[in-house]
Amino acid sequence: MFHNKRLVVETDFDMIADLMKVDTTVKPPAIHEILDSTRHRFSPRWIKYMYAKFKNECPNGKMGLPEFKRLFGFYVPNRVSDAYLERMFHAFSYNNPDPDTITFSDLVECLSRLNDEDAQTKAEWTMRLMTRKHSDRIDYGEFCEFVGSVFQLVGREERRRQATTSRHGSDETITDPSTANHIAYRSAVVFKELDTDADGYLTEQDLVQFFQKYDQPAEHLNHTP
């Protein structure tokens, strides 16, 4: 019996020792590496400030969708939908082996990208927003879903009210008929303009040509005729 107790104790210590060897936190690169990868776009002071905020929100170094919404929900337009925030999240985690988490490196890399003005970078980022899977082309249905996420113009307070009154308690929005019609119209118009070769798909090159042609392409998605 004593032998069995000793075996259990040794087993417990072995398990604890194994657990102590596992580092569950994700450590960021050194500051000089971040500066190099972002072409010194951000100052060391800013990087330290952002990392402090990131660690405060995500002690283990991994940011999930709920933390992302809390961190960025204050900086995006008040009427942007949760569906669009989710697309932003997956665009940030695009190169992460775990698509459901964002590391500090992912965060800084994407913030650096968003400061680029060249057509190629804009096209790459837009492709990330449009598709959650690594695909080199987008069909009309996927494009309509993307435009719909942009046009889910329900304010935060209204979304909270709907979430509390929803039968399922979810944060889903309800699209009124006029908005749905406008989404369908804008989707058709913009998709046709982007799909220059009329093959029924959008590629990164289609978007590059679009961004090269227009200085402020976002207006084409948000403009109301």
Image: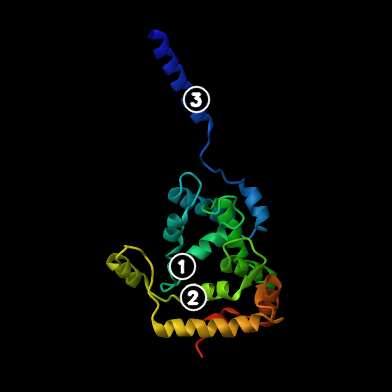
Residue 94 lies, in percent from the top left, at 59, 58
Three-letter code for the amino acid on which mark 2 is drawn: Gly
2 and 1 marks in contact (CB < 8 Å): yes
The residue that label 3 is drawn on is 17
Query: SS class of the residue under badge 3?
Result: helix
Mark 3: which amino acid? Ala
Q: Which mark is residue 148?
A: 2
The answer to whether the residues at label 3 and label 1 have Cβ atoms under 8 Å apart is: no
Foreground: disc 3 or disc 1: 1
Task: Identify the element where label 2 is drawn.
Answer: helix
Q: Which residue is mark 1?
A: 83
First along the sequence among labels 2 and 3: 3
Calculate the distance from the C-alpha at mark 2 to the C-alpha at mark 1.
9 Å
Residue 180 location in percent, x, y? 45, 81
Query: Who's the residue at 58% across and 54% down the image?
Result: 106
Type of amino acid under label 1: Ala
Of 36 and 181, nearer the camera is 181
Q: Earlier in the sequence, mark 3 or mark 1?
A: 3
Farthest top residue in view? 2
